[in-house]
Amino acid sequence: MASAQDVREMFKRFRILVVGRANAGKTTLLQKVCDTTEKPEIFDGDGNKISADVVRDSANYRYDDIQNELVFRSIPRFVFHDSCGFEAGGADEFKKMKEFISERACTRILDQRIHAIWYCIPMDEYHRAITTAEERFFSECDTNNAPVIAVFTKFDALSAVALGELRTTPGLTRKDVLERIPRRVEEIFANANIWGRLCETRHPPRNYVCLANLNIDKVDCGPLLECTTGALGDEALQMLLMSTQRTNLELCITFTVEKVLIPYVRRARQGSLQLSEDCITMQKEIAEWFPHTGVRQMICPSGLAITSRI
């Protein structure tokens, strides 16, 4: 397995293409992922920064060029691309997006490759969650090795729908209504069959995540990062995402347990673990999944402290 340092040298940044109609909550989503309230800095396809004056003086500026890079200063190794435009039905915009995905998903220039795609679908319009735009994307866009995650934003809108339905149900107290809202939300989502319809397309998303209340300070995007990491499959890319994000320690712990501790426990039960050698190796492998944490000492089974830095 490549070390965290090797991964950072191979892939300088983690790139994500964000797709979705206007008002799908994309900007809020990216701000949450990067733990900031600031707007992103914008760079053109050649890496030149687009002046803030240009953005400020353009009342309807929407990062319309898919080649533009959106970078937040809080986590500069995340690079986002916005596919604005194609969902309005324009043939030229859809063609540009397909060409961008085809080129960037498998380019040999590693620093230009997109690693994941987040397709945002707002649930405040769940009756029309799958429009012509979604049908075209998932039937015509082969994203190669870049996994697509369906991100159901504004999921809290279904809570309002559930509340309205339950309030008219005879015999329910206010407490009963509040307790039944979560289950009713799940039923509404399941009955809409949105995920099922996406799975039946020619190029279905790899997984999905539901995000609610992104406008609340304490809400984070941990589920989205975990879902994306799992969908990547390749450990080098998973480690790249770990190295890029700096706000989710729980995510590092989750994949450390899955990728390192469980295999070692399995080997110990089979009696194939060599403590004198494997103990140090295991500690090194654990440290690799915490790329922003320095390791100064590792303890071998004899109790000897070995000074090191990873």
Image (tube, rainbow, N blue to C red):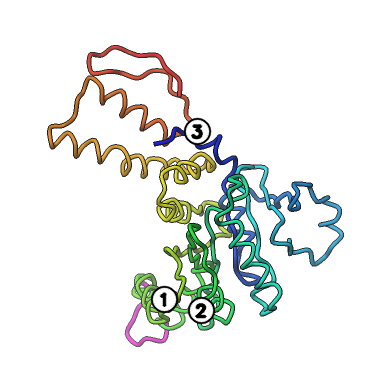
Q: Amino acid at mark 2?
A: Tyr
Instruction: Residue 240 in the image: state x and y as whole percent.
Output: 50, 42
Helix, strand or loop status at disc 1: helix
Q: Is residue 301 left or right of residue 38?
A: left
Residue name at image x 47 percent, y 52 percent:
225
The residue that mark 2 highlights is: 126
**Residue 169 lies in the magenta stretch:** yes
Image vertical order of residue 145 relative to residue 93, above or below: above
Helix, strand or loop status at disc 3: helix
Sequence-earlier tag: 3 or 2 = 3
Instruction: Residue 124 in the image: state x and y as whole percent.
Output: 55, 75
- Answer whether labels 1 and 3 touch (C-beta < 8 Å): no
Q: Is residue 84 left or right of residue 8?
A: right
**Residue 142 lies in the magenta stretch:** no
The residue that mark 3 highlights is: 6
Q: Amino acid at mark 3?
A: Asp
Helix, strand or loop status at disc 2: helix
- Answer whether labels 2 and 1 touch (C-beta < 8 Å): yes
Query: Mark 1 packing: few (<14 Cα in 10 Å), some, or many (20+)?
Result: some
Camera-nearest residue between 144 and 173: 144
Q: Magenta residues: mostly which secondary structure?
A: loop
Image vertical order of residue 306 relative to residue 251, above or below: above
Tell me where the magenta segment starts and ends, as one range. Answer: 167-175
Instruction: Residue 200 in the image: state x and y as whole percent.
Output: 41, 77
Camera-nearest residue between 116 and 119: 116
Q: CA distance from mark 2 to mark 1?
A: 8 Å
Q: Is residue 144 left or right of residue 179?
A: right
Q: Amino acid at mark 1?
A: Phe
Residue name at image x 56 percent, y 41 percent:
11
**Which residue is most to the top?**
304
